[in-house]
């Protein structure tokens, strides 16, 4: 029997949309249609992929596609996604899902009302190293988690419609809440613009407070830093782990190191250090490489074909938007600000209970 191709429109053929097109065009049985409002962009898409159809507006092809990927600047996500959802098409929207909580909620409600799936492009939840780190944290190997530090720094692409928190921290919020199976309940933030007089901060520090586990996570994001850093550090009572996305072959490291308090009631040890140190092996598990965007987009195509719900649904994207919106209030007030209305994150895989082999 003749198998019809799954027709996916990718809206936005810029830096990231062109990667979606590369990945989707490589999947068997997928036909890609490229939409971009700028003629040069669609011309480049046709030069790179002579067989793809192109258009300058989604509406021109909406009746002829099975699903839509939105990879335009964040402030345009809601309008584009809503028109596709209202036409009954499943939609994958890049992070951040939207730039206001109201838009994010409307997108989730519209998907539900039209009985179609909305998925958010939280790419790192499809990253094999992040999944491995989650197994390690969930197994209890690190002991009780004391805090998490995440750094996403580089001489980055300055965005004109959002600040560096909305641009980069969706990744950190998605990774950390995925690791902990918990959304932060409050956020504090400091951010500043250092270059030019644009309205959006280019360097920021965010503190996320996770009430259930009592853990604080600290997120540093910057478009103005000389070295590219993509690193998450989980500090546990027994061991510590790092996920370094810039490492070729040691993306996850587990450090058998720790610090224990000394017994201050022991007066015979007056001059002793207030802590003692433990140090041991550093182990790095083998993680076979698979491109996270490939895994994510393959999953989206599978959801379109089968009707199964996505692992990163619109609700998850809306929760991350709620955290981002709380950082806006935190910046304006200088206060630790509640994150209102989050569900707990959807767990992609069952929590592991036993020890994890490294
Ligand atoms: N998941 C990730 O790791 C990751 C990485 C980078 C960017 N992103 C996200 O991808 C999205 C796009 O970012 P980018 O860096 O590719 O931006 P970009 O500016 O490079 O590209 C955006 C493209 O969208 C086109 N466009 C804008 N409005 C349009 C509209 N209404 N209709 C059709 N085309 C339109 C522009 O002409 C441009 O070609 C953002 O949401 C960003 O946050 C995600």
Image (spheres, rainbow, N blue to C red):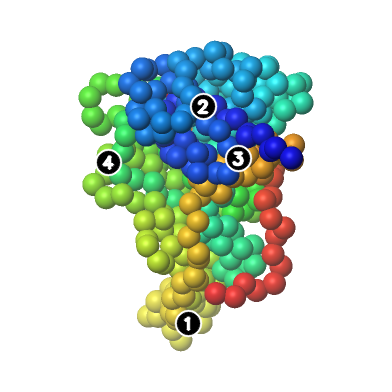
Nearer to us in this view, 355 or 184: 355
Q: Earlier in the sequence, mark 2 or mark 1?
A: 2
Tell me the SS state at disc 3: loop
- Image coordinates for residue 63, horizontal then vertical, percent: 64, 17
Quarter of the image that includes the N terminus? top right
Asked if the residue under mark 3 is in contact with the one under mark 1, i.e. CB atoms within 8 Å, the reply is no
Q: Give the label on residue 33, or none.
A: 2
**72 displayed left or right of 79:** left
- Image coordinates for residue 145, horizontal then vertical, percent: 57, 61
Which residue: 41% across, 31% down?
50
Quarter of the image that includes the C terminus? bottom right
Camera-nearest label, 4 or 1: 4
> Between marks 2 and 1, how big is the CA–CA gap?
75 Å
Tell me the SS state at disc 4: loop
**231 displayed left or right of 315:** left
Q: Earlier in the sequence, mark 3 or mark 4?
A: 3
Q: Which residue is mark 3?
A: 29
Tell me the SS state at disc 1: helix
Q: Which residue is mark 4?
A: 155
């Amino acid at each position: 029997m003749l198998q019809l191709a799954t027709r996916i429109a990718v809206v936005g053929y810029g830096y990231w949309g062109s990667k979606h097109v590369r990945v989707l065009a490589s999947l068997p049985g997928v036909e890609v249609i490229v939409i971009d409002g700028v003629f040069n962009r669609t011309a480049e898409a046709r030069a790179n992929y002579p067989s793809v159809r192109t258009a300058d507006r989604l509406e021109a092809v909406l009746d002829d596609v099975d699903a839509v990927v939105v990879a335009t600047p964040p402030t345009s996500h809601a309008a584009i996604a809503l028109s596709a959802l209202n036409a009954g098409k499943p939609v994958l929207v890049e992070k951040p899902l939207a730039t206001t909580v109201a838009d994010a909620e409307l997108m989730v409600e519209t998907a539900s009302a039209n009985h179609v799936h909305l998925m958010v492009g939280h790419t790192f939840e499809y990253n094999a190293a992040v999944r491995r780190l989650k197994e390690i944290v969930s197994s209890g190997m690190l002991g009780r988690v004391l805090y998490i530090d995440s750094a996403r720094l580089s001489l980055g692409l300055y965005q004109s419609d959002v600040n560096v928190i909305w641009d980069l921290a969706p990744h950190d919020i998605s990774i950390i809440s995925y690791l902990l199976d918990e959304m932060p309940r409050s956020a504090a933030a400091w951010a500043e613009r250092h270059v030019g007089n644009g309205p959006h901060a280019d360097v920021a520090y965010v503190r996320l407070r996770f009430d259930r586990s009592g853990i604080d996570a600290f997120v540093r994001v910057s478009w103005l830093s000389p070295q590219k850093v993509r690193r998450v550090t989980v500090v546990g009572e027994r061991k510590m782990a790092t996920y370094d996305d810039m490492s070729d072959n040691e993306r996850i490291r587990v450090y058998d190191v720790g610090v224990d308090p000394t017994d201050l009631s022991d007066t015979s040890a007056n001059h002793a250090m207030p802590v003692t140190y433990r140090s041991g092996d550093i182990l790095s598990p083998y993680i076979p490489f698979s491109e996270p965007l490939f895994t994510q987009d393959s999953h989206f195509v599978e959801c379109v074909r089968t009707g199964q719900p996505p692992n990163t649904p619109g609700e998850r994207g809306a929760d991350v938007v709620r955290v981002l919106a709380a950082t806006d209030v935190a910046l304006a007030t200088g206060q630790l600000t509640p994150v209102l209305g989050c569900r707990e994150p959807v767990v992609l895989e069952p929590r592991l209970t036993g020890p994890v082999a490294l």
